[in-house]
Each structure stands twice: as C-alpha cells, then as structure tokens.
Image (cartoon, helix red, strand yellow):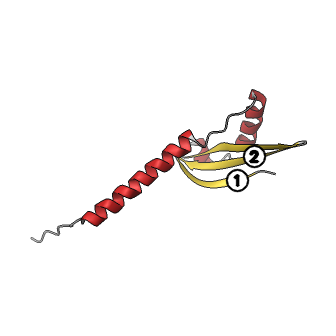
C-alpha cells in the first residue's frame, strides 16, 4: 500500500498565513469602517426602501448577499447612494452607484 504524504513547505505556510491575515483585515475594515451614519431616520428609511426594491433576489433574502450604504451625496433635489455588496455581510465584492 502506497501512502502519499503531502509536504507543506515553510513558504506555503507563510503565504497561507498572509492570505488569512489579509482576509481578516478586509472583514474588519468592512464591518468597522464602511458603515455610513445617517443624519436622520427619514434618510435611513429612504435608503432602505431603495435597497429593498432594487435588490430583492433569493440570495439577499437568505442573507448570503447584503447591501450597505457607504456614502450619500445630496445635490439640490437628487440623492445619490454609494452602495457596496457583501458576501455573508463581511466580504465586499462590488460597488453600485445610484442616479
């Protein structure tokens, strides 16, 4: 009987460790620094209504994907949202801008 032993080099361990540290840093940044603080509850409600209307697929309902408001730009009578998509609420994977 032949046993295949997989040898993991120190270089591989270092690369995997760095990757995990960077992923953890990205997750912490996403939770702590990406959040937008709304000026009023009305603004928050309007943003949430827009998100619920535009992003209503099954993956959003199941909680696998989520959307967060990153920035709000109000000019005269228009409000423009900068939204970021997240996998499991932690890993960002795309930005959207509304018009």
Q: Residues within 10 Å of mark 2 (few under 14, many from 20)?
A: many
Residue 76 image offset from top left, x and y in percent: 90, 42
58 with respect to 78 (left or right) = left
Per the image, label 2 sits on a secondary structure element best described as strand
Q: Going 75% across and 46% down the picture, which residue do you hit?
A: 81
Q: Are marks 1 and 2 in contact (CB under 8 Å)?
A: yes
Q: Identify the image quadrant of residue 19.
A: bottom left
Q: CA distance from mark 1 to mark 2?
A: 8 Å
Q: Which residue is mark 2?
A: 81
Residue 38 image offset from top left, x and y in percent: 71, 33
Q: Is residue 43 above or below residue 14?
A: above
Q: Identify the image quadrant of residue 22.
A: bottom left
Name which of mark 1 and mark 2 comes first in the sequence.
2
Per the image, label 1 sits on a secondary structure element best described as strand
Note whether residue 19 is visible.
yes
Q: Is residue 89 above or below residue 19?
A: above
Question: Image quadrant for the N terminus?
Answer: bottom left
Q: Which residue is mark 1?
A: 96
Q: Nearer the viewer, residue 85 or 23?
A: 23
Q: Residues within 10 Å of mark 1 (few under 14, many from 20)?
A: few
**Farthest residue, direction bottom:** 2
Q: Is residue 62 above or below residue 40?
A: below
Res 85 label? none
Q: Going 62% across and 39% down the picture, which residue do you hit?
A: 35
Q: Nearer the viewer, residue 13 or 83?
A: 13
68 with respect to 3 (left or right) = right
Q: Going 55% across and 45% down the picture, which residue do you hit?
A: 30
């Amino acid at each position: 009987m032949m046993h295949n032993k997989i040898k993991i080099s120190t270089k591989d361990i270092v690369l995997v460790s760095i990757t995990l540290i960077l992923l953890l840093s990205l997750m912490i940044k996403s939770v702590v620094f990406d959040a937008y603080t709304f000026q009023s509850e009305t603004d928050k409600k309007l943003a949430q209504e827009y998100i619920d209307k535009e992003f209503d697929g099954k993956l959003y309902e199941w909680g696998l994907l989520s959307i967060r408001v990153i920035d709000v730009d109000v000019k005269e009578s228009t409000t423009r949202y900068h939204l970021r998509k997240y996998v499991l609420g932690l890993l960002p994977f795309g930005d959207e801008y509304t018009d």
